[in-house]
Amino acid sequence: MSKKNPIINCHAHVFTGDYVPPYLAKTFLIWPFYYLLSLRAVINCLRWYHNKIKPFFFTNKVKKIKRWFYESEIFFRRNYLLGTIKRLAEIYLIVSILFYVGLWQYDITEPQDTLIGKWVVKALIFIKDSGWIIVVPKLWLKILYLVLVLIVFKSIRNLAISVLNIFKILPGKNFKKLFSRYVQIGMFSKYKTQSRIYQQLEKQYPQDTEFIVLPMDMEYMQAGKLKPEFTINSQMEGILKIKKTNKETCHPFVFAEPSRMKDKAYFDYEVDKSTGEVSLVKGCLVQEYLEEHDFAGIKMYPALGYYPFDEELLPLWKYCVQRDLPIMSHCIKGTIFFRGKKKSEWDEHPIFTEGKIDEAMRKTTEHDKKLDFDIDADYILEDGKPLYLNEIKNVDFCNNFTHPLNYLCLLNDELLKKVVSQTKDPRIINIFYDNDGEYRGEGLSDLKICFAHFGGDDQWKRFLESDRDNYTSQLVLKPDKGIDFFMNASGKPSPGKLAYVWRYVDWYSIICSIILQHKNVYADISYILHDEIILPLLKQTLANDKLQEHVLYGSDFYVVRNHKSDKELLADMRAGLSEVEFDQIARENPRAYLNLD
């Protein structure tokens, strides 16, 4: 039996918390409270805890205290009479807490207008006059009393949390996601070097496993400044050290950030005017890491405030096509995104135009009355107006940068021409047009792109729940192509169609369709693989002969740790997929993506 190729985790991070801006809570909390929840403060607290407090829990004194608590609790549980007394005491304390909360909400000396208010005041007066409740006169004593009760009595603490959740007094889901991300970065912050984090990653997998290591350049997301010593250069130096000691198993990428790439020390290039080919200038950081240190590809994170077709990126994408270098691009709605104010130019899409359904076509289709939208309906442009992007919150408008349809502006020649027409840089124009102004016909359609996170588990669920439109059915009706983004069902151009797909079609359907139509496009299941609901649809995806060769295994270590450890994620995948399916996405497809064969 021949030996299998090693597993390749196509999505892993090893950057320390020192490379993350301190104010990720900005836009989730109002000023100045996001300063109080500084990531730097969280990291310092956790490092202090691991270095000073955690060792204390292993002392004999703490062990004796834990044993005393255990013996006390088990004594009450085993003695029916004392257990009953304990439960009665808990009931008494709950009533007393409710009494003080009621006094805080209602003035029992004033008449109440509502029926509920009247009943509550009557109950409060009854309890007060009964003498059952011990009166705690001062506010600080009441607070101390409440804190002690919540600490000592777990059942009361759980009840309080449940009530707060019911009335939505506790922070919302976005803040919870952010805070859990804080905690995960903080938990790994006890490791002050990227090498130590990489060692923790290796321990989760079989010995010969290989990893794509992805850097993060978050300096321009307007969430606070990093310390001067923690630059993208020092982060890359740390990754290089890992690669030098793990030459066969570590495949690091270089980060592409348009604002950073304006610095020629980071990225500089030359264009051959006769061929349009791009070469990197020796000595710039990107050239050094790609050509001298043999880094494997490019990482991009559009949610930080740019489109994947930003003109600063175009020369690098041409270079990637020439060398068949893979690109990993963030494609999920998440908690790491641009934290500054929305710019006015972001109110409209720079390439796509508004469209609307042809009402005459709609009225002729009787079946359309039962659907939200029918694939046979045509689209007409609204006077060529740019696609309007009216999202206000950062967490919403940053998804416009991450939207998978943006990549058609690179992969499709006609859209790419429109992108290039907006630049005034003669070097960029010369990449795609010859000296006579003729399009070279060698665009970016062969660009090797991976949609990281496959659009997100919420988009997979949205696909599964959609049964009233014809777009989600295109992967079944046309398994070799999926959604046609440019033509209607009659095969005629439908120029406003992209606007509708942008707004109303799930990202899973879009990504699968792009993969089916472009031979070098991939998607990884990193982060979303923690959710068991994706397994049935993943198996269905792998049943498509073309899609199965373009899905990659990845975990998103260590960011996904708030859900599961990497070894648990790996075990779940191997249990949920057949051996052939797992080997396809974890052993074979990654090798093609990385050009290892």
Image: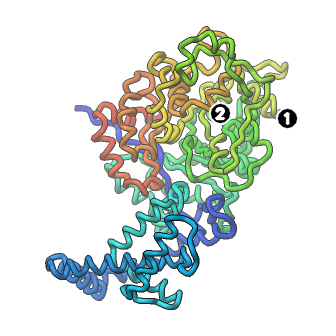
- Tell me which numbered mark, 1 or 2, is placed earlier along the sequence: 2
Across and down, in percent, residue 102 comes to 49, 75
Left or right of residue 351: residue 467: left
Secondary structure of the residue carrying numbered label 2: helix
Question: Which residue is painted at 43% across and 64% down in the image?
Answer: 163
| Residue visible at 56% across and 71% down in the picture | 112
Q: Quick check: 501 left or right of 170?
A: right
Query: Which is nearer the eye, 414 or 509?
Result: 509
- Residue 182 locus on image (x, y percent): 52, 62
Amino acid type at circle 2 is Asn
**Which numbered disc, 1 or 2, marks the residue closer to the eye?**
2
Q: Which residue is mark 1?
A: 424
Give residue 261's mark. Answer: none
Relative depth, front residue between 318 and 387: 387
Tag 1 and tag 2, C-beta contact below 8 Å: no
Residue sitting nearer the eye, 96 or 482: 96
**Rendering coords of residue 494 (x, y %):** 68, 16
The mark found on residue 406 in the picture is: 2
Image height of 151 relative to 445, above or below: below
Name the colouring of the figure: rainbow
Of 536 and 232, the residue lying toward us: 536
Is residue 484 left or right of 352 when viewed as pictured? left
Q: Secondary structure at mark 1?
A: loop
**Mark 1 and mark 2: span between their CA atoms?**
21 Å
Give the image quarter of residue 491: top right
| Residue in view at x 83 percent, y 36 percent | 425
